[in-house]
Amino acid sequence: MPSIPHQTAPSDERVAHFVMDGDGNIVEWDAGSELMFGWSRADALGAKLSELIIPPDQRAMHEAGLARYKATGQGKFLGKPLQITTLNREGAEVLIAITISM
């Protein structure tokens, strides 16, 4: 009897990896990030993460958290899985699962 290869349903899940420095500037932006957010690596590198993908009504909170981390070395979301709303290049909301690490 011939074997039938195992098939799985296509996944809608996308994986992206991006890195910001202590000032909130993007220093790494992979191909998954390009697909997910619509910004090329060249466009993203050096840009403020908060200005590129954080919704305007959440930017102050993001910046305050970054400043708190820089001042104290403490971050209330470090190492915790989160779901947050981000924006793609067209301004459409993109819900992502993220874990922030330093």
Image (cartoon, grey):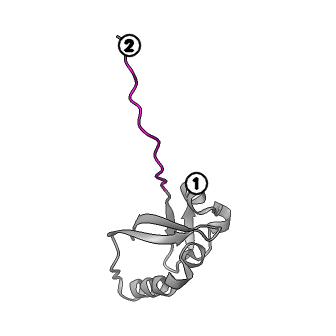
* Residue in the picture at 48% in, 71% down: 85
Tag 2 secondary structure = loop
Name the one closer to the observer, 33 or 89: 89
Whether 4 is drawn above or below 12: the answer is above
Quadrant assignment for the C terminus: bottom left
Residue at (53% x, 76% y) in the render: 54
Residue 69 percent location from the top left of the image? 39, 83
Judging depth in this view, the residue of 97 and 47 nearest the camera is 97
Q: Which contiguous range is marked in magenta?
A: 3-15
Query: Which residue, given by chain and number where applicable, does mark 1 sit on?
Result: 31
The residue lying toward the viewer, choosing from 73 and 7, is: 7
As drawn, 40 above or below 58: above
Residue 29 picture quarter: bottom right
Give the residue number, with chain letter if any, for mark 2.
2
The N terminus, quarter of image:
top left
Q: What is the three-letter code of the residue carrying label 1?
A: Ala
Residue 38, visible in the rendered structure? yes
Query: Tag 2 or tag 1, which sits nearer the N-term?
Result: 2
